[in-house]
Amino acid sequence: MTPLLRVARLLVSASPRAMARGAALTLVVLLMGAALLGLSGWFITATGLAGLAGIGIAFDVFRPSAGVRLLALGRTAARYGERVLTHDATLRALAALRVDLLTRQAGLDARALARLRGEANLTRIVADVDALDGIVLRLLLPVLAGLATHAVVFLALGLLVDWLVAWLVLLGYLPLAALVLRRLARRGIAPSAAAEDRAQTLRRGLIDMLRDREALILTGTLGARETALLDVERQARAAARELDRSEREAGALLSLVVALVAALALLAGGWLVQRGDVDAAAAAIGLFVALALAETVLPLRRGFAELGRMLGAAERILQDDPGPRARGPAPDRDQDRDQDRDPAPPVPAAGAPLLDWRRGPLSLMLHAGEAAALEGPSGAGKTTLLLRIAGMTDAPADEIRVLGRPPLDWPEDLFRDIVTMVPQRSALIAGSVRDNLTLAGPATDTQIWAALEAMDLAAAIDERGGLGVRLGERGAGLSGGQARRLSLARAILRRPGLLLLDEPTEGLDEATAERVLAGLRRALPETALLAALHRGGEHPVFGQRLRLAR
Amino acid sequence: MDSPERPTAAPPERGASERDASEGRASERDARARIIAPVRAELRRAGLLAVLAGMIWPLQAAAIAWAIAGWATGTDVLARSLAAALAIGIGGLVRAGLEHRSGRLLFEAADRTIARERQALLLREARARAPEGSAAVAALALQKLPLLQPWITRYHVAMTRVAVLPALLLLLTVSISWAIGLVLLVAGPLIPVFMALVGMAAEAASRRQLAEIGTMNDMLMDRLSALLDIRLLGAADRAAQDFSARAEALRERTMAVLRIAFLSSTVMELFSAIGVAMVAVFVGFSLLGEIGFGTWGAPLTLGEGVFLLLIAPEFFQPLRDLAAAWHDRAAGQAVVAELEAFDRAERVTVVGQGEPAAPLAGPMSLELSGAVAALPARALPLPAFAVAGSALIALSGPSGAGKSTTLAAIAGLVPLAAGRITVCGRPLGPSTADAWRARLAYMAQAPHFPDQMLADYLDPLGEGADPWHALDLARARQVVEHLPAGLRTRLGETGGGVSGGEARRLMLARAILTGGDLLLADEPTADLDGETAAMIIAALRQLKAGGRTVIVATHDPALIAVADRTVEITP
């Protein structure tokens, strides 16, 4: 249960005031409901008695009838306020949680980022977060408000009617309802967790199948994959069916609890009237209030039925939280972020080269406007070196200096303004060409066209309909070489001081590759370029060549 | 890749939210025919049970009223109390039983409907891709289809109850007091009128919310796949802001739906509360003798008064339930509207079924003549060429000319708009495509690794073949040996965990292990250094020497140089 409490605290602490007001209103709704029925029952019985006794004229009808109207209207208003407040506060907290989860993923180091599977994280951020809304709305608030209502009603019944009735209502409702809900929680927790788990598996599997569809068709295994997914779908529904049965049973049992307590209150009322301890009007209050309290238990069944789903989601979301940021270079960077708020941001040492790298006998120094080719066989560590320079993985302490400081000593924001990298498997997003190019920040159409022109892509984009043309998932709609050049144009628009390129000309024919390298240099005359290449290191753009051995 | 997909128009779901009211009404008929008609029998039975359950309360109320009247006059106090308590208990038991049974029928009806729609999606989407992103499809199947459940389980039962119970309770009320009946008669029908007004706003709000769910899913999926790029571009904060805006938009749209629901249920509750309060006050004054009209002669008794008070809320309850279910109906119809927009979406259909098939008989031969690939936005003419028996053919041409599309069309992944492709002497079509594909292996340009272990990835047919020979041939043995978990590794979506060249060698190993006598390879030497590229080229030549036909799309001059023939593609 601890994960549920931690998530509940997270959700409540996001907007404690709105939650507190919502909780107060929840209580008010339940209390007013009980008071309304109690008062109405008393009022009618009392007027009946007065009528029978022939003292109708002396009976004060106005205050009770005003009370009935006040309670009826007040309860309605309170319920509206309660619902809007608690739902709004919860949804706000959940939206913030989604963003937090994404930010947390974005802060991982390069290796973790490259291995990250989109669909798994998607279910985390969408489905798991969705599952959490019930923790406050359908469990915490109704249970607490229900308990508080029973406490108040107990005192009121004891003082107004008789302690026997008060005890009967309290002991009839609380232990029995608790037993039924406990049974529901125990029986429901496994199917509820299984239903959610299967549904998430199905969601991931469906995305994976759609993204891998060509390979599945080619191997003739699409049908088999579909059958496997249909199987998961059946399991999900079987679990949902089992849960539904438990939930309906609990619903039936809870309504029996209500009938039982009402019957007991009626019997007790009759007994008290018979003994002459209370009059019929007061005795009626007990019965009517017992009926009204159904509202404190019946709605709880849904929250308890979802327990397994919520618990699993809470565990997964909390487990993703690395806690005190334990992974990779993240801790340093976080500290740096804090330092970033210091009045004195790091100032580059005067005249320090943009890049100063040394490892054993090898070294490389790049100033503004210079360019170097990084060569070496597959597996020599070219990509790793670029990622180290880009501050995405740990590096030996004195290997790399960017403007005089190790990459990981830089505050992230400042560093990304200086250094940009285009990785080997660069990814585009669904959306327009413009969306893709302005991913990192706004740019004018003139700047965008200039960058496209430099990458020899302007004509092709123009022919397709300009910057507004929409690309599909992962940038589908462009050829491999066009996608490569679009991601290079995206980097040009950042105008970095140091641009790291991993295989910039891969997938391009020689003539295009030539134009792309020259265009890059022309578009960014002041930028220091470092490009890892399998071929083409002899291009005149590169003033230096560095060869890594395996 | 000269992708078989295309720049797409705006997703239809965006259009769906903006459709006009007349189309919305047409879709209501369709929605009922599609979702409700097949389960009408269950719904009718469940509604009947629910009506029976609703008839129990007046009996219980009468027993309670009778007991309380006894308390007031002091007649048979204990005996009446006991009898009424029994009535409450037994009535409660019967009612719980009826509702339990009705609930089961409803669950079955909803379950069957959702299963049918979801299975249809599952079996269609991979075969005929719509422009929607995979995450939006998954959201429709897993997040939105379940919204049909409340509509199916609540709306029709609520309708049936409304048709019977208020009239019955009104009749009971009028038989005692026509004045109170009048109160109910005035307050009651306002509810459906108001409901209809709210319902239209509710459906529009639901559609906007559903559209936002799809958009958020797709956006998030793409951002998650591009996280490394986003981070390296220094765009992490901006991506978080963009996503934050989306998450916030979803919250707002969800709140808009909820606010309408809350507001309308508040108004319903208000009518009901005012009605009940008026009944209580009227009964009170009548009992005191201050109001002398409203009954059929004899003055109202205490028992009658209590009975009227007890059944008044139940008169309003079915109407309020219907009002609440109206929103479920609105949400359900919004889902159906999206399903139908999705049915109408323009799709790229694969040729054939994607099922296992015996390899096409006859000697290997392939001929493209006048073939034009039917990409959704445009038709792309393919080069004409023929090949038979063992050969190494290179397709070359500038970036964007259609090399990858040619390979995709040969594999039957893209349908033709004109011309034909002849395979093993027979036209490539729905009846031959699966058998044709059983003879070929394909190596795509962009690495994509499904969520499975490397061992399963390398051996997609699950034949249990030893992967090491193929790994040796593709020069990928070391790649696997260097992975900490070896063949049990799960790679990232685009091969995270190995370098670009290593990923490509793994793809080649898979293509070799797949077997077949035609290998289609898209840029097999991309991301490789000269030495490794030379080894891969040697491997491809070795495959050709072993009798296979190899067709590569490439820019690599070294690969073009060793090809038996080069087919030049011009844009």
Image: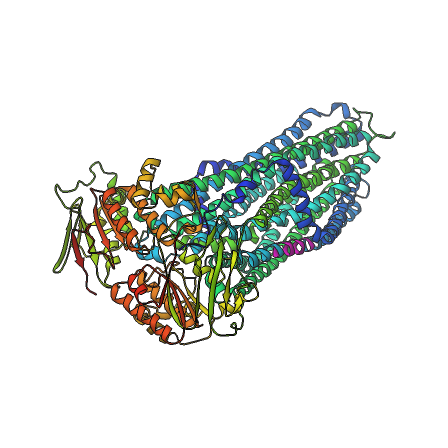
Give the position of the N terminus of chain B as an image quadrant: bottom left
Q: Position of residue B353 (x, y in %)?
A: 55, 63
In this picture, residue A370 sits left or right of residue B95: left
Residue A261 position within the rendered picture, expressed as x and y whole percent measured from the top left: 67, 48
Rendered image quadrant of residue B327: top right
> Which region is colored magenta?
B105-115
Relative to residue A533, is residue B426 depicted above or below?
A: below
Residue B541 versus residue A145: which sits nearer the camera? B541
User: How many labels were placed on the picture?
Assistant: 0
What secondary structure predominates along the stretch shown in magenta? Answer: helix
Determine if the magenta segment contains residue A337: no
Q: Is residue A77 left or right of residue B176?
A: left
The residue at 73%/39% (across/down) is A276
Q: Is residue B112 magenta?
A: yes
Colour mapping used in the image:
rainbow
* Residue at left offset 45%, top offset 43%: A95
Outermost residue toward the right? B297
The foreground one among B539 and B424 is B424
Q: Position of residue B318 (x, y in %)?
A: 71, 41
Name the one closer to the observer, B528 or A292: B528
Image side of residue B569 versus residue B367, left or right: left
In the depicted structure, whether residue A325 falls above or below residue B14 = below
Counting from the top left corner in percent of width and height, residue B520 is at: 41, 65
| In the foreground, A493 or A88 | A493
Q: Is residue A95 visible?
A: yes
- On the image, which quarter does residue A509 sit in? bottom left
- Can see residue A327? no
- Identify whether A47 is placed above or below B467: above
Residue A113 found in image quarter: bottom left
